[in-house]
Image (cartoon, rainbow, N blue to C red):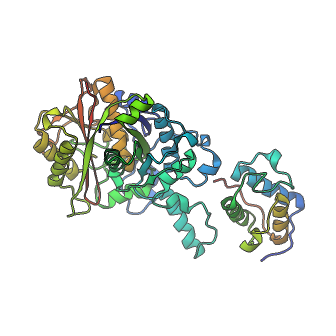
């Protein structure tokens, strides 16, 4: 059974709609800015982040908004965009046991977690805690709040695997549509910017420290002068739909979601592993019923870390050879964590629709350790038929998926 | 629990209404003493709990949670605050959420 993407929504550091976001990519803009105020946090040395632009959160009714942190607000706005494009109703008309809402985040709100525990320690107990705080920090805060905002009361799942969260949500959605359990899966992820998120990576020396005074120059995926990732925020949501449902509704597809795979390393929490990356890409090709020769663009996960980028290049080279164009969009967006998988799928769909390859921003001199693949360093026209998109995460998470334009 | 108050009834009404408007986005013209929290003002049990937390913080008072269960109208809130408000404390700045 074929599965298609019929709707997309994005709230990103490059803009709060799919079109704004993609225009930002076409213009080679960056969402990264400096946060010199983070220097006050002892032990933190990375002062860069990529926030989503402000938006009118008052569009979300207060009764729903009161239990939302920023990540849930971003996810709600992105979900509404995706449903609108898919021509699906918002509210009672959406309710069906054949529609799954499947999205997650890295953690509950880091902003509220800090406030919650700060107050807990100050007061010596839970005195003064708002009843709604927990609904902002619980692990399934994002989909639960999106459901409440939409009035959706169908099936809901909340996969969470940090930076591969939305990739896993989409692949899981594809599996469940394939299995016949659902006709439609609304899949995605969201995260919000907070200094502790930068600190998580900085502690393991994976965050960019050398460009605090030149935010536009970092992160630098695959570049010789890369020094780590830059955390971002955002929400991205796609509507996956079976071909039968699409035809029944008269919905218009963007591209085919051909399938994907997820495999864990089971060896190390933070060190990337080219061997498992290779395995997951091969498995994704098999499950998507595609050959390596079909792939004519790779959207890499590459975040700008020393090891992650080089390991991914080694895996791409092993699976696809050295001639397939490869780029990473982290140099534009920063790393939006749970959102990045679906966001990069959406960006890839727009590249396919517009026959253009977006280059890796800040890739000036390819690191010899990242050589051997066809890095895209300039925007260029291209007819893109099949995309392979990778996402990896702490915990040894590896995901890979394929899209086809059918051109 | 603290009792008595140097706050006038007008000050209590003003402080409570400011919170209901800024914190819970209730239009000021709906903030009449007879308004019921749930039916007229669209609040629910979570809002009631959070309203109490905000009032306690804003006015530096302490209200037993059990007493909240008997509150039905905005006038009941004014009365509850009037009973427990601490005389010496000045109102603090608004917080929205």
- Please tell me whether residue A398 is drawn above or below residue B89 in the rendered image: above
- Res A284 seen here: yes
Residue at image position (58%, 39%) is A56
Vertical comparison of A295 with B11: above or below:
above
Residue A69 point in image, percent of width and height: 53, 53
Return the x and y of residue B33 as percentages of the image width and height: 86, 55
Taking the image as shown, residue A197 lies to the left or right of residue B52, namely left
The answer to whether B52 appears left or right of A85 in the picture is: right
Rendered residue at 33%/25% (across/down): A353
User: In the depicted view, which residue is nearer to us: B92 or A105?
Assistant: A105
Number of marks in the rendered image: 0
What residue appears at the point 42 percent right and 50 percent down from the top-left corner?
A103
A339 vs A24: above or below:
below
Residue at 20% x, 64% y is A267
| Image side of residue A243 versus residue A274, left or right | right
Q: From the top left corner, tell me how far across and down residue B44 is, in percent.
A: 69, 58
Q: Quadrant of the N terminus of chain A?
A: top left
The x, y position of residue A136, in whole percent, is 53, 57
In the image, taking residue A69 as reference, residue A317 lies left or right, namely: left
The quarter of the picture where the C terminus of chain A appears is top left
Name the one closer to the observer, B71 or A374. B71
Q: Is residue A224 visible?
A: no
Of A96 and A149, nearer the camera is A96
């Amino acid at each position: 059974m074929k599965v298609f993407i019929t709707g997309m929504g994005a709230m990103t550091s490059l803009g709060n709609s799919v079109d704004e976001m993609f225009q930002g990519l076409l213009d080679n803009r960056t969402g990264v800015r400096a946060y010199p105020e983070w220097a006050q946090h002892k032990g933190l040395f990375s002062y860069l982040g990529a926030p989503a632009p402000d938006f009118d959160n008052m569009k979300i009714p207060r009764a729903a908004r009161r239990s939302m942190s920023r990540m849930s607000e971003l996810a709600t706005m992105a979900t509404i965009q995706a449903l609108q494009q898919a021509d699906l109703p918002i509210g009672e008309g959406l309710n069906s046991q054949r529609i799954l809402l499947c999205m997650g985040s890295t953690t509950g709100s880091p902003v509220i977690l800090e406030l919650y525990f700060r107050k807990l320690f100050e007061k010596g107990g839970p005195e003064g805690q708002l009843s709604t705080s927990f609904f902002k920090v619980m692990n399934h805060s994002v989909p639960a709040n999106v459901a409440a905002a939409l009035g959706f009361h169908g099936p809901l799942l909340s996969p969470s695997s940090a930076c591969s969260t939305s990739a896993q949500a989409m692949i899981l959605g594809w599996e469940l549509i394939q299995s016949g359990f659902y006709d439609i899966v609304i899949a995605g992820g969201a995260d919000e910017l907070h200094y502790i998120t930068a600190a998580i990576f900085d502690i393991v020396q994976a965050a960019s420290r050398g460009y605090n005074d030149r935010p536009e120059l970092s992160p630098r995926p695959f570049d010789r002068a890369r020094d780590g990732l830059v955390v971002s925020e955002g929400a991205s949501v796609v509507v996956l739909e079976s071909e039968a449902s699409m035809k029944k509704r008269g919905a218009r597809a963007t591209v085919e979601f051909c399938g994907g795979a997820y495999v864990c390393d089971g060896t190390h929490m933070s060190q990337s592993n080219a061997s498992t990356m290779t395995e997951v890409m091969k498995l994704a090709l098999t499950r998507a019923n595609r050959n390596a020769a079909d792939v004519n663009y790779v959207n890499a996960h590459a975040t700008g870390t020393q090891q992650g980028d080089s390991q991914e290049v080694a895996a791409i080279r092993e699976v696809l050879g050295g001639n397939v164009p490869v780029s990473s969009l982290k140099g534009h967006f920063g790393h939006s964590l749970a959102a990045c998988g679906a966001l990069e799928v959406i960006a890839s769909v727009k590249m396919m629709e517009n026959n253009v390859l977006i280059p890796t921003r800040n890739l000036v001199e390819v690191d010899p350790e990242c050589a051997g693949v066809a890095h895209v360093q300039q925007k260029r026209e291209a007819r893109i038929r099949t995309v392979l998109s990778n996402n990896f995460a702490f915990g040894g998470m590896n995901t890979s998926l394929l899209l086809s334009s059918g051109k | 629990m603290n009792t008595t108050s140097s706050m006038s009834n007008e000050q209590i009404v003003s402080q409570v209404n400011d919170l209901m408007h800024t914190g819970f986005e209730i239009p000021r013209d709906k903030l009449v003493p007879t308004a019921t929290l749930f039916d007229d003002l669209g609040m629910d049990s979570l809002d009631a709990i959070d309203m109490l937390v905000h009032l306690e913080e804003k006015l530096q008072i302490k209200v037993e949670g059990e007493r909240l269960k008997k509150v039905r109208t905005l006038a009941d809130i004014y009365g509850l605050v009037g009973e427990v408000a601490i005389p010496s404390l000045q109102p603090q700045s608004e917080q929205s959420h």
